[in-house]
Image (cartoon, rainbow, N blue to C red):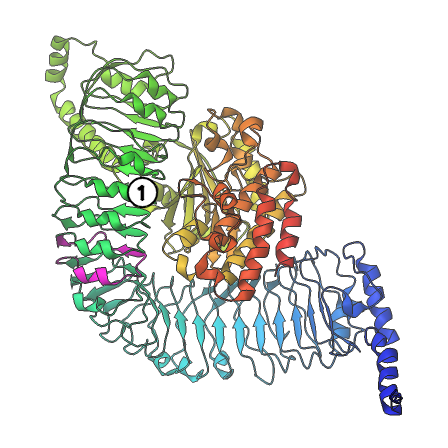
């Protein structure tokens, strides 16, 4: 046997040290800090349920590496409403960062400012997204504070010297408050400020020269204020500036040439202002992104503007630029928007030889001539191509069929005179195809029915002949089909059951009976068969079209009686032999159509009133012509849009003096009279863009379901409901500013959101730029808005149609829940029985609605779950011919296939977070309403998945 070796003394000491000391590592906080943390816990109970004896293990609490003292406390999104605990936090002398964002705090105690100002190492304070009111507190002390975030609150008043004592301040975020007066210039005596974010306030006056003394500034965001005058000409002094955002102000003058000397400037956005003059040469020399859209810039585009190798985004749309398009593009350029200018000449073909990164190209509403370059077919990443409203002629290049990623193709209002190439059928991702108002001939190629993702097809106002392809019903997700004003004939095949907006076959050569198969189109709103040779009677099956609002049959040799439709719809039958014997007919059309006057009497009347008759005929022709062309427009609207009913009442709801002075109701009504102003159409609403005399832009939203709006006599109730909604204060909820009532409909005014809806961004022209950080931020923002609405004090505010189209985006990370007024002002009891007419859009309707016919909070949670799935998958609510929820369940065994690969492959961390939120989405779309969580719990789960 070998001799046993005893351990050395030093080894025993190490073991003894580990056994005795390691358990204490978890509880090394001083007694004072332990007591302070316990006192904070008592003050926050029961809101916060911290457990365990070691505060360093509590959620949101961070300590130094050996857990000997507290360095950070994060109480973000804990639903805190009382700020009494804040002075207790100041007793932690080692505190370095404090985050109480995303709560309901309405004040900061004086004791907090006094005591926490003494903490030598406090570097970060985050009070964002609360309900803080009053003026900005004066910060005494805080000698180490580097970051102060008080964004998304209700702070108001002028800012003077309140922040000047913050000698270490590097980042200041006061966005989305109500600050007024001049921009603050006393932002730390040592002037080390780097990030200055003051957007979405009410600051006015000029951009002061004093700001240029902060030479360390790298990021300035002053958008959405009331700033006027010009940009300081010596702004080039800010040599470290990387981002400059001045959008949505009232700035004037020219773009300073000194900007071209800032070598680190990467992004410059000054859109929605009143800048004049020309674009400075060399302004994009160092930029990656330039946005000067919606200004008054004129002159030519500098020849080198689009060529710098690092350049990625240029938006000069809606100016007065003229001349030709530069022929040299950066190989990294992926978004180019030059629409609504006065550009002319040919579109240079050599510009697209190296355009392999070009994803969004918009040259619409200019005066370009010549042909569409075939070289565009080499831009394989193109998702949006908009050349509409130019003077382009010649053939439609078959090479466009190579654009395998194309989602939107708009070529309407040109002079194209060839046939539609069969290669169009190769565009399998195409959502919108608009070739309307050209001179295209030949037949509609059957290959076009292979576009399985197509939502909108516009071929109206051409010279197309032959018949409609028999396989047209293969377009299983088509919402609108415009084939009017062509030379089409033959048998009308079965139409896609998905049609919702409009089916326009007017002004063709169709004959025979009206197909009874139209009765299957239960979601269709407008059917236009006017100006054809249809004969016989109206099939009774058309009464099954329960969503129909307009049936246009004028100028056809039809006969018999108009069927008794189950709901009141507008039937236009001028120039037919139809009779309307229903109790509540269409008096205007009926009067015009009656044949009871003898020929002799008619001649006598004509002789006696010849002059008046000529005038009358002229007016009728003009009226009919205007109505006819607007029905054929790509956004067909109801007759009331163009022949507005008498106005009964108008009222401003907002207390904001700026809005009250900007809003002119007559301008709002002029805007809704023109279909060209339509920016968005949802199930219940049509959004118009209205430019006021001041230059400010607003949404005017027309409520489409006029027969379900609170009836005449309840206008006061309507107004009172809107007054309540206008007072809602949540950064993720879209509230009305004013309203106008007519005898049969309502119009609401809102702040204009230039980014559009989540649907537009996620599934439209900007989908590739929506990264995971943006999608996650949108999910959280929508959840916050819904939680607020569901928890409204008097009673929950529910959404009749919650979808990605009703979510507007202030930015790619800031959503607004819209259409909140529908639940209050639309009466579901007047529903015709069409589920989507009351409960929302296809794909978002909770399964229980089929038998409950009731809008509930649980139903809203289901719809939100669908929105989550859209954000996770990148797919619309109806995908591959089925609802997205069913598609996800069908592919649940392959999670990587479900997630949007463009996003999930970014990193493992992103993929893991997406999978965590996928589980939340699955709970939200549970078949049983009882299994779905409340929105408040959904919000908590989303934040915990961060």
Q: In this orientation, does residue 603 appear?
A: yes
Viewed as shown, does residue 516 lie left or right of 849? left
Quarter placement of the N terminus: bottom right
| Circle 1 residue | 456
814 in relation to 676, above or below: below
The front one of 32 and 593 is 32
Where residue 934 sits: x, y (%)? 65, 44
Quarter placement of the C terminus: bottom right
Viewed as shown, does residue 702 lie left or right of 197? left
Quick check: is 129 in the magenta stretch?
no
Where residue 479 sits: x, y (%)? 35, 38
Q: Residue at x 88, y 74 (%)?
A: 31
Q: Judge the density around disc 1: few (<14), some (14-19), many (≥20) Cα neighbours within 10 Å.
A: many
Q: Residue at x 36, y 15 (%)?
A: 564
Where residue 495 sits: x, y (%)? 30, 31
Quick check: is 390 in the magenta stretch?
yes
Extreme residue toward the front, this view: 1
Task: Read off the magenta span.
Answer: 370-394
For mark 1, give the secondary structure.
strand
Where residue 767 sits: x, y (%)? 40, 57
């Amino acid at each position: 046997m070998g001799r046993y070796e005893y351990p050395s003394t030093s080894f025993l000491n190490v073991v003894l040290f580990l056994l005795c000391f390691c358990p204490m590592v978890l509880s090394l906080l001083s007694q004072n800090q332990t007591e302070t943390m316990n006192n904070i816990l008592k003050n926050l109970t029961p809101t916060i349920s911290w457990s365990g004896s070691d505060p360093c293990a509590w959620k949101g609490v961070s300590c130094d590496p050996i857990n000997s003292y507290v360095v950070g406390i994060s109480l973000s999104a804990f639903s805190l409403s009382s700020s009494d605990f804040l002075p207790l936090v100041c007793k932690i002398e080692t505190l370095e960062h404090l985050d109480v964002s995303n709560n309901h705090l309405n004040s900061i105690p004086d004791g907090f400012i006094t005591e926490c100002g003494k903490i030598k190492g406090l570097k970060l304070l985050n009070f964002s997204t609360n309900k803080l009111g009053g003026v900005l507190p004066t910060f005494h002390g805080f000698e180490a504070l580097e970051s102060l975030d008080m964004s998304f609150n209700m702070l108001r008043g002028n800012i003077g010297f309140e922040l000047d004592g913050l000698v270490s301040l590097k980042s200041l975020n006061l966005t989305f408050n109500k600050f007024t007066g001049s921009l603050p210039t006393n932002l730390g005596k040592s002037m080390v400020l780097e990030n200055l974010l003051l957007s979405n306030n009410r600051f006015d006056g000029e951009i002061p020269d004093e700001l240029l003394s902060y030479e360390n500034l790298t990021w300035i965001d002053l958008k959405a204020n009331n700033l006027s005058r010009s940009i300081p000409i010596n702004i080039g002094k800010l040599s470290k500036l990387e981002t400059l955002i001045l959008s949505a102000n009232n700035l004037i003058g020219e773009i300073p040439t000194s900007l071209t000397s800032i070598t680190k400037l990467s992004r410059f956005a000054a859109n929605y202002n009143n800048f004049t003059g020309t674009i400075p040469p060399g302004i994009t020399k160092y930029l990656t992104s330039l946005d000067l859209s919606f200004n008054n810039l004129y002159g030519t585009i500098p020849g080198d503007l689009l060529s710098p190798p690092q350049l990625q985004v240029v938006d000069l749309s809606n100016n007065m630029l003229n001349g030709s398009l530069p022929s040299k593009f950066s190989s990294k350029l992926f978004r180019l928007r030059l629409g609504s200018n006065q550009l002319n000449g040919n579109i240079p073909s050599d510009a697209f030889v190296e355009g392999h990164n070009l994803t969004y190209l918009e040259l619409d509403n200019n005066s370009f001539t010549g042909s569409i370059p075939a070289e565009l077919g080499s831009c394989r990443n193109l998702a949006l191509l908009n050349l509409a409203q130019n003077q382009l002629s010649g053939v439609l290049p078959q090479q466009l069929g190579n654009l395998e990623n194309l989602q939107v193709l708009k070529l309407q209002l040109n002079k194209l005179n060839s046939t539609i190439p069969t290669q169009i059928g190769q565009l399998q991702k195409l959502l919108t195809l608009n070739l309307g108002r050209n001179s295209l001939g030949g037949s509609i190629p059957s290959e076009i029915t292979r576009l399985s993702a197509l939502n909108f097809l516009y071929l109206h106002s051409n010279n197309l002949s032959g018949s409609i392809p028999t396989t047209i019903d293969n377009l299983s997700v088509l919402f609108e089909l415009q084939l009017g004003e062509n030379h089409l004939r033959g048998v009308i095949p079965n139409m896609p059951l998905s049609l919702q907006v409009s089916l326009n076959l007017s002004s063709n050569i169709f004959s025979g009976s009206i197909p009874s198969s139209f009765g299957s189109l239960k979601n269709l709103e407008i059917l236009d068969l006017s100006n054809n040779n249809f004969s016989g009677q109206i099939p009774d099956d058309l009464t099954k079209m329960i969503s129909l609002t307009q049936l246009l049959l004028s100028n056809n040799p039809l006969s018999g009686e108009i069927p008794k439709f189950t709901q009141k719809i507008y039937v236009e039958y001028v120039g037919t032999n139809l009779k309307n014997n229903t109790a509540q007919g269409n008096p205007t059309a009926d009067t015009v159509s009656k044949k009871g006057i003898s020929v002799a009497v008619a001649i006598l009347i004509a002789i006696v009133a010849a002059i008046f008759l000529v005038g009358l005929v002229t007016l009728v022709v003009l009226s009919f012509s205007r109505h006819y062309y607007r029905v054929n427009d790509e956004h067909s609207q109801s007759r009331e849009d163009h022949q507005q009913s008498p106005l009964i009442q108008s009222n401003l709801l907002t207390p904001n003096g700026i809005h009250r002075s900007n809003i002119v109701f007559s301008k709002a009504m002029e805007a809704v009279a023109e279909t060209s102003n339509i920016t968005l159409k949802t199930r219940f609403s049509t959004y118009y863009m209205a430019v006021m005399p001041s230059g400010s832009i607003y949404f005017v939203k027309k409520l489409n379901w006029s027969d379900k709006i609170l009836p005449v006599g309840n206008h006061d109730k309507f107004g009172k409901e809107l007054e309540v909604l206008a007072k809602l204060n949540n950064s993720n909820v879209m509230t009305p500013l004013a309203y106008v009532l007519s005898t049969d409909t309502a119009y609401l005014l809102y702040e204009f959101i230039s980014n559009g809806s989540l649907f537009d961004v996620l599934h439209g022209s900007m989908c590739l730029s929506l990264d995971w950080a943006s999608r996650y931020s949108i999910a959280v923002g929508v959840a916050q808005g819904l939680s607020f609405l569901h928890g409204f004090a008097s009673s929950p505010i529910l959404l009749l149609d919650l979808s990605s189209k009703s979510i507007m985006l202030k930015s790619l990370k800031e959503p607004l829940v819209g259409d909140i007024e529908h639940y209050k002002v639309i009466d579901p009891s007047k529903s015709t029985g069409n589920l989507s007419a009351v409960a929302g859009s296809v794909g978002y309707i909770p399964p229980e609605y089929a038998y409950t016919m009731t809008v509930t909070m649980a139903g809203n949670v289901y719809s939100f779950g669908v929105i989550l799935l859209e954000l996770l998958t990148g797919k619309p609510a109806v995908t591959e011919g089925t609802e997205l929820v069913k598609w996800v369940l069908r592919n649940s065994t392959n999670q990587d296939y479900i997630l949007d690969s463009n996003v999930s492959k970014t990193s493992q961390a992103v993929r893991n977070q997406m999978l965590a939120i996928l589980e939340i989405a699955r709970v939200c779309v549970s078949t049983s309403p009882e299994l779905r969580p409340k929105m408040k719990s959904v919000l908590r789960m989303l934040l915990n998945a961060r």
